[in-house]
Amino acid sequence: MDNINIGLLGCGVVGTGILRVLADKRDTLRKERGLSIDVRGIVVRDLDQPRDNIVDTAKLHTDWIQVCADDDIDVVIEVMGGTDSARDAVLYALRHGKSVVTANKELMAKYGEEIRRVAREYGQFVRFEASVLAGIPVVHTLETYFHISQIVRLRGIMNGTSNYILTRMHQEGLAFADALRAAQALGYAEANPDMDVDGIDAWCKLQILLDCIGVPQDARVGTEIGGIRSISQADIRTAQTQNCKIKHIVSAEWDVASGLVNWHVGPETLTLDDPLYAIDDVQNAICIDGDASGTITLSGPGAGALPTASAVLEDVLKIAQKLQVSLSV
Ligand SMILES: NC(=O)c1ccc[n+]([C@@H]2O[C@H](COP(=O)([O-])OP(=O)(O)OC[C@H]3O[C@@H](n4cnc5c(N)ncnc54)[C@H](OP(=O)(O)O)[C@@H]3O)[C@@H](O)[C@H]2O)c1
C-alpha cells in the first residue's frame, strides 16, 4: 500500500467536495490502486465557521505555512481562491518540496509561468485541471492528445454563470438584470458577478489553455474582453427570429503563416448547426479543432463541488504516478 499525504488549503465548496469524494472513493482507491490518500491538515480562514460533518475539525489550521512546511505532506491542494495568499502558499509549498494541485484559474492565469518555473527549479509537479472547466478534462486532453494533429482552433463556452443568464434570457424572456438575480439566488453567480459577466473569468481560462499548449505571450493577439451585460431582450429576440442563440464564446484561432494566435472573448450569435448551440444552463463545452482530427467537443459541468473535486483528485493521482508511487493503472 502506497500513501500520499495531503495538505488541503481551503475548505469551502471545493475543499469540502474533495473530502466528500475522498471518503466515498477511499476503499476503491485502496483495493484497485493500492493507494491511500490521507488529508493531514486543512487550512481555513475562520476556525469558528460551521463545517460539513465530513470535515475532521481536529485537522483545521489557520496558518498555511504550518501545513506547507510539514515534512509529512507530499502534495498541497490549493482551493482557497484569490491570488495573494494562494500565490504565496503555492510557491512556499513548492520550495518546501511539495507538489501542488490547484483549482484556481485567477492564480494560474496571472502567475502560472512563475509557478511552473519554481516547480521545475525544485523538482516538483503542478497540476491545474480543475481551474479550467472544472470537471471537463480539457487540460488532460490537450496534454495527452494532439501530438499528431495540430490544434488550429479552440472555441468554447467557458463561463457557466454567463451561459445560465443567457439561457434564462432566451427561454423565459428575462432581462439581463433579472436573469442575473436568478443566478445569484441559485448560487450560480457571486454577489459581485463582474469576473463572470464581464468575460474575465472566461479569458483567464483561455490564457491557461494557451499556456498549456505552449503559445508564447507575444504570439497572442486579442483586442478587448467582452461580456454579456449589454445583451438586451431585443438582441435575444432578433437571434430567435433567425433560429439562433446568443452565447458567450471564447475562441482562439491559429494563423499558420504568422504563427500568431488570435483570441476573442465575447457574445456571438450561433446557428442551430453549431456544436455549442445546445450547451445551455450552467453547462460548459469546448471544441478543439485539429488539422487532421477535425473538431472534438468536450462538454459537461464547468463548476460544482463534486465535479471540481473529481478533477482535483485525478490530478493528485497523476502526481502520485509521477512520484513513482506504484499504481496499477
Ligand atoms: N466552486 C466551484 O464550483 C469551483 C469550480 C472550479 C474552480 N473553483 C476554484 O476553486 C477555488 C475555491 O473555490 P470555492 O468555491 O471552494 O471557494 P470558497 O467556498 O469561498 O472556499 C474558500 C476556502 O478557502 C479558505 N480561505 C480563503 N482564503 C484563505 C486564507 N487567506 N487563508 C486560509 N484559508 C483561506 C476559506 O476559509 P473559511 O471557510 O474559513 O472562510 C474557505 O474554506 C477558487 O479558486 C475557485 O475559482 C471553484
Image (cartoon, rainbow, N blue to C red):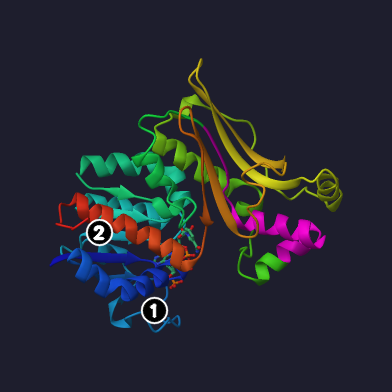
- Give the quarter of the figure containing the N terminus: bottom left
Number of the label disc, if any, that sits on residue 75: 2
Instruction: State the image coordinates of residue 232 (x, y, percent, origin top left).
Output: 82, 50
On whether ligand 1 comes within 8 Å of the CB at mark 1, the answer is yes
For residue 314, side relative to residue 239 (left or right): left
Q: Is residue 313 above or below residue 290?
A: below
Residue 305 on the magenta span: no
- The boundaries of the magenta stretch are 153-181
Number of the label disc, if any, that sits on residue 172: none
For residue 276, side relative to residue 58 (left or right): right
Q: Is residue 250 above or below residue 313?
A: above
- Give the quarter of the figure containing the C terminus: bottom left
How far apart are the alpha carbons under marks 2 and 1?
Answer: 23 Å
Label 1 residue SS: loop
Magenta residues, dominant SS class: helix
Residue that numbered label 1 is attached to: 47
Q: Mark 2 or mark 1: which is in front?
A: 2
Q: Callout 1, which amino acid?
A: Leu
Label 2 residue SS: strand
For residue 141, side relative to residue 92 (left or right): right
Residue 171 on the magenta span: yes
Instruction: State the image coordinates of residue 84 (x, y, percent, origin top left).
Output: 43, 54
| Residue 36 appears in the picture as rendered | no
Instruction: State the image coordinates of residue 278 (x, y, percent, origin top left).
Output: 65, 52
Q: Residue at x 19, y 44 (%)?
A: 123
Which image quadrant for residue 224? top right
CB contact under 8 Å: marks 2 and 1 = no
Rendered-image quarter of ligand 1: bottom left
Q: Residue at x 54, y 41 (%)?
A: 287
Which image quadrant for residue 155? top right
